[in-house]
Image: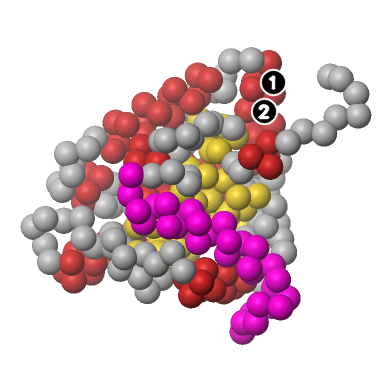
Amino acid sequence: MTGTATARALAAAALLAAGAGGAQPSRDSVPARTVLAVGAHAGDMELTAGTLLLRARAQGARVVLLHLTLGEGGNPRLAPEAYAAQKRREATAAAEALGAEVLFAPYRDGELPDDDAARRWVADAIRQVRPTLVVTHWRESIHKDHAAAHAIVKDAVLLASLAGARSAHPPHRGVRGVWYAENWEDADGFRPYVYVDVTGVLPRWREAVTRYEFVRGGISSFAYLDYYTALATLRGAEARRGQAVAFDVDPLGKRRVLDSIP
């Protein structure tokens, strides 16, 4: 790892460390930071960004999960309607374990529409939640819903900030960054840019994500727990930490402007 990349990792870890030790936000207070994680399916963001949400919540941030679909088509043994009910229960339990609020969009698994209506729905959710950081999928994916979620969220952040875009909620211009989570299905072109230290968080993360049957191994043959645990160790080694979680950002977000050489 280069010196520049190491500095980048340390700076990212410091981003979440800045508020460490602060009091938990009360109902009458507005936390300085709100993280909104938007996933194509219930379970996506918990697996890829759940450690970030746990770290942010412990440091006083408000954390919110938005599931664009329930991922109800993923169980070959259950009808989509039955699995949707199960996934909603699991998503609610996982959010509680992460200390997060949870929202559900009205879209169906495999049919997430990459259109203006979906962008306006998500923009309205952004205006309600008023996040300072948004986390969602990387742009390239083997799953069409993931790619659609990326495009929808990226445009919705802009739409939510525009006064001319009418809604029942006022514009929100406070999003300081959009980060793209590392997902085994979204690997094409993903390059870690931001690293966040999540050392010590994994036991609570495992407790939260195993609220989902598909993570426990009852549905899919993919070893989700093993993969993301190993990935946290790998990214931790790169960042010179015990465990870390990595995110990519838009190319323009990687621009550095210097008045002199380092």
Q: Is residue 232 above or below residue 74?
A: above
Which is more toward the observer, 228 or 258? 258
Magenta span main SS: helix
Disc 1, SS: helix
Choose top left, top right, bottom left or bottom right for residue 81: bottom left
Which residue bears the numbered disc 2? 8
**Range drawn in magenta:** 142-171
Disc 2, SS: helix
Which residue is outermost to the right? 259
Residue 130 in the image: x percent, y percent?
64, 66
Which residue is outermost to the front? 115
Q: Residue at x 16, y 56 (%)?
A: 75
Which is more toward the observer, 41 or 29? 41
Is residue 165 located in the magenta-colored stretch of the structure?
yes
Disc 1 crowd, CA 10 A, few/some/many (<14, 14-19, 20+)? few
Which residue bears the numbered disc 1? 4
